[in-house]
Image (cartoon, coloured by chain):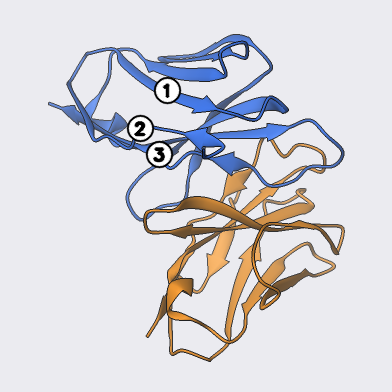
Amino acid sequence: EAGVTQSPTHLIKTRGQQATLRCSPISGHTSVYWYQQALGLGLQFLLWYDEGEERNRGNFPPRFSGRQFPNYSSELNVNALELEDSALYLCASSLVGSAETQYFGPGTRLLVL
Amino acid sequence: QKEVEQDPGPLSVPEGAIVSLNCTYSNSAFQYFMWYRQYSRKGPELLMYTYSSGNKEDGRFTAQVDKSSKYISLFIRDSQPSDSATYLCAMRDSGGGADGLTFGKGTHLIIQP
């Protein structure tokens, strides 16, 4: 069974640009979560989507947004990039109501210059 | 005070030793407790999760939760060089729908051959 996949693996942008990151969940999983893992800060919860709707978001500004498609894949958009947005962005998926069993993808490493 | 505290290490032990990894937390609403393993430049891998207090064993791994002390542990028996990784504890409460996990910053473990 295929795990969570993410693309691209690496992304280099400059300040002020927009970044789009993509995630495909494990087959059968409808919940998708996004996390940011910045150096020294640990994993921080960004967004949770289920059945196409944003269900919850962490303590991040509105320039972090996303969506979930009918096939449950998801996209994370980061607008007006800042240097401190440089981080590993991780996507996880789970069955609905089973947030304690989230399975992570390999991540997208975003570098903002 | 951060919600979840975890000693960053590094923790270096000889092969075959018993390893003890720990986290403390402040939010008494946490009910689910997870341990993830993350190899360098990879996404976190779910090792095991526990609901409420008690012990759970899976092969060489044992998770313990003491809610009265707000303290959780992961024990690794017969440690192997392949266990060298960063170990992350994570937690969530049981309220409402699923939401993001709260992570510790991780402990870097080195098993010396």
Q: Which residue is mark 1?
A: B22
The amino acid type of the residue labelled 3 equals Gly
Number of callouts = 3
Residue under the point 79% across and 30% down: B94
User: What is the drawing colour of chain B?
Assistant: blue
Give me the disc on residue B7: 2
Q: Which residue is mark 3?
A: B106
Residue B27, placed above or below residue A7: above
Disc 3 versus disc 2: nearer the observer: 2
**Distance CA(mark 3)–CA(mark 2):** 7 Å
User: Are circles 1 and 2 on residues that touch, CB within 8 Å?
Assistant: yes
Count neighbours of disc 1 (C-alpha within 10 A) and say few if under 14, some if 14 to 19, many if 20 or more.
Answer: many
In orange, which chain? A
> What secondary structure is marked by label 3?
loop
Q: Which chain does the residue under circle 2 lie in?
A: B
Residue under the point 12% across and 26% down: B113
Q: Which chain does the residue under circle 1 lie in?
A: B
> Do callouts 1 and 2 point to residues on the same chain?
yes
Count neighbours of disc 3 (C-alpha within 10 A) and say few if under 14, some if 14 to 19, many if 20 or more.
Answer: many
